[in-house]
Image (tube, helix red, strand yellow):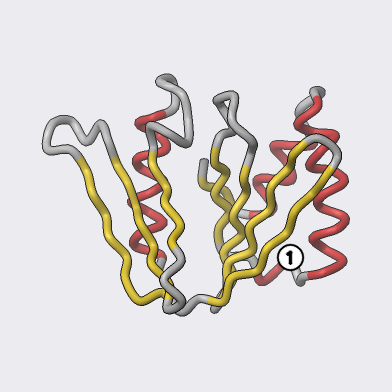
Amino acid sequence: MLYTYNDLKMHCANRVDIFRAQYVNFFEILEDLYNSEEIKKVYIKNLFNSNDVQTFFFFEGKIVKMTISDLLFNIEEIKYGIVKKQLSTSRKFERDVQLKLTFDDSSEIIFNNCKDSNPDFQWDYGQDIKELYKFL
């Protein structure tokens, strides 16, 4: 799902499960390292499926990727250097939407509405990925 930083914080504050506990701690760490007012977009992979949750914070000129696994927060900063962005979608009903970002060091990040979500949220994720494409 695509959020603003403040919307994500409010969403987490209203939850009462393990997700909230994990993110409350992470917000403290993130705000110690970065100015949260500079975050333009937040994309969360695997929020609605059983894979490890990955959160991407989009700043001007960089992306900060946060992964939560067991007792560890992993934070990775990627300077933009996007040399290619490729949006793919199925011709029928826009069911499959994928954004592939290729960086100047040949690394890639792929956002895919079917793999990043579950069937209940795939359409929403597809719309979010298209919005992210326009933003970048």
Residue 101 on image: x %, y %? 39, 62
Amino acid tagged 1: Ser
The C terminus: image quadrant: bottom left
Residue under the image location 87 percent in, 66 percent down: 32
Residue 2 on image: x %, y %? 51, 47
Secondary structure, mark 1, is helix
Which residue is disc 1 drawn over? Answer: 36
Q: Residue furthest top?
A: 120
Residue 125, picture quadrant: top left
Residue 39, picture quadrant: bottom right
Front residue of 94 and 75: 75
- Compared to residue 50, the image places residue 62 above or below, namely below
Residue under the image location 82 percent in, 49 percent down: 26
Total count of labels: 1
Residue 51 on image: x %, y %? 59, 31
Residue 98 on image: x %, y %? 32, 46
Q: Residue furthest front?
A: 106
Residue under the image location 82 percent in, 38 percent down: 22
Q: Crowding at label 1, few (<14), some or many (≥20) Cα neighbours within 10 Å?
A: some
- Compared to residue 8, the image places residue 83 above or below, namely below
**Left-right relation of 103 to 25:** left
Residue under the image location 27 percent in, 55 percent down: 87
**Left-right relation of 14 to 76:** right
- Compared to residue 48, the image places residue 130 above or below, namely below
Q: Residue furthest left?
A: 91
Front residue of 32 and 82: 82
Front residue of 76 and 134: 76
Front residue of 129 and 5: 129
Residue 11, picture quadrant: top right
**Left-right relation of 98 to 118:** left
